Amino acid sequence: MIAIVVGKFSVNAGHKKEQKHLTKLEEFYQAKDYAAIDEYLSDKDLWDSSYEKYDEISRVYTYYAYLENDIMHIREILDSEMTEDEKASQVSMWCESVIEDASSVLEQSAKYSEDMQFLGNEEELERFYHNVVTLLAEFGYTKEEIELIRQVEKDNIQRELLEKLMNYYLK
């Protein structure tokens, strides 16, 4: 009898703790504070299906943040005192990262928003997707090329896709 009471108490305590985490994560989500979601999930080691809505956002946000960071690095390189050859070499490396991270955002946000599980995060996932499509279009990529970027496998970037981005920055 004691085991049943202890077990019931333990399940109740676990449920309350989960609800506390979900409430906090939803606060971050409503505030669009995706960095806080990412940090909270990591700090609390919350990776089961109860937190899937937030985990999906966290994963896509992380690649989106990497993408923004890649672009920032390219701009810093272009504003630096490096020679033109050094700039071209460095920009090439960061352009590969831009394409890889853009591909990850596109692929994961599409996968999660089309996965037939309605978690309530689909609108935000689609926003990330469209932001990256818009960014790539600003770089001069066509819809067909953007679809190719979405399908890019790490370390297997088509030379034409990379050159187009490099030409955008090194014109």
Image: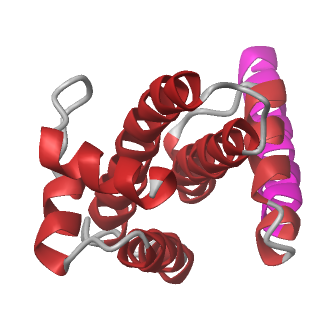
**Location of residue 105 with respect to 83 vertically, above or below:** below
Q: What secondary structure prevails in the magenta region?
A: helix
Q: Is residue 24 left or right of residue 117?
A: right
Corner quadrant of residue 124: bottom right
Chain part drawn in magenta: 1-26
Q: Nearer the viewer, residue 151 or 96?
A: 96
**Location of residue 39 with respect to 55 vertically, above or below:** above
Residue at left 28%, top 56%? 164
Q: Is residue 36 left or right of residue 116?
A: right
* Quadrant containing the N terminus in the rendered view: top right
In the image, residue 105 lies at what x, y percent?
42, 54
**Location of residue 123 with respect to 156 vertically, above or below:** below
What's the image's color scheme?
secondary structure
Q: Nearer the viewer, residue 58 or 70?
A: 70
* Quadrant containing the C terminus in the rendered view: bottom left
Q: Is residue 63 left or right of residue 39?
A: left
In the image, residue 153 lies at what x, y percent?
19, 34
In the image, residue 78 lies at what x, y percent?
67, 43
Residue at left 43%, top 40%? 95
**Location of residue 43 with respect to 68 vertically, above or below:** above
Q: Nearer the viewer, residue 136 or 56?
A: 136
Q: How many marks?
A: 0
Residue at left 44%, top 80%? 134
- In reply to whether residue 151 is colored magenta, the answer given is no
